[in-house]
């Protein structure tokens, strides 16, 4: 598996994520955060470095 390089951070989305009462992730686990039409998409390391989890948080 090739190395995934996701280095885009949306500062507004990141601020929302870090202040979200329901979802709190250690910064080290967050690969990237982007604001999309669906909501905030968060890319996380999961169970080591090979599995990536993507979640979408509804902003509305």
Image: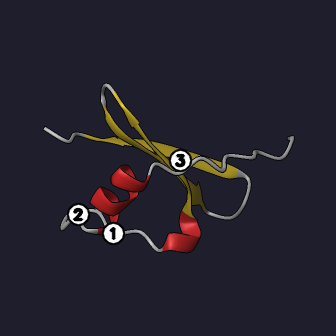
Q: Are marks 1 and 2 in contact (CB under 8 Å)?
A: yes
Residue located 18% across and 68% down the image: 21
Residue 20: numbered disc: 2
Across and down, in percent, residue 27 comes to 50, 71
How far apart marks 3 and 1 lie (CA) works out to 15 Å
Q: Residue furthest left?
A: 60
Task: Tell whether 14 sits left or right of 39.
Answer: right
Q: Quadrant of the C terminus?
A: top left
Q: Residue furthest right?
A: 2
Residue 53: numbered disc: 3
Q: Give the SS element for disc 1.
A: loop
Q: Are marks 3 and 1 in contact (CB under 8 Å)?
A: no
Crowding around mark 1 (Cα neighbors within 10 Å: few <14, some 14 to 19, many 20+) is: few
Residue placed under numbered mark 1 in the picture = 24
Residue nearest the viewer, comparing 22 with 16: 16
Across and down, in percent, residue 1 comes to 86, 41
How far apart marks 2 and 3 lie (CA) works out to 18 Å
Q: Give the SS element for disc 2.
A: loop
How far apart marks 1 and 2 lie (CA) works out to 7 Å
Q: Which corner quadrant of the image does residue 40 belong to?
A: top left
Crowding around mark 3 (Cα neighbors within 10 Å: few <14, some 14 to 19, many 20+) is: few
Task: Tell whether 58 sits left or right of 36.
Answer: left
Q: From this view, report whether residue 45 is shown above or below residue 38.
A: below
Across and down, in percent, residue 23 comes to 28, 63
Choose the circle earlier in sequence order: 3 or 1: 1
């Amino acid at each position: 598996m090739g190395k995934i390089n996701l280095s885009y951070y949306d500062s507004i989305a990141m601020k929302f994520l870090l202040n979200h009462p329901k979802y709190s992730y250690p910064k080290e686990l967050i690969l990237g955060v982007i604001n999309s039409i669906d909501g905030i998409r968060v890319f996380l390391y999961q169970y080591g470095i090979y599995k990536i989890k993507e979640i979408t948080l509804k902003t509305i």
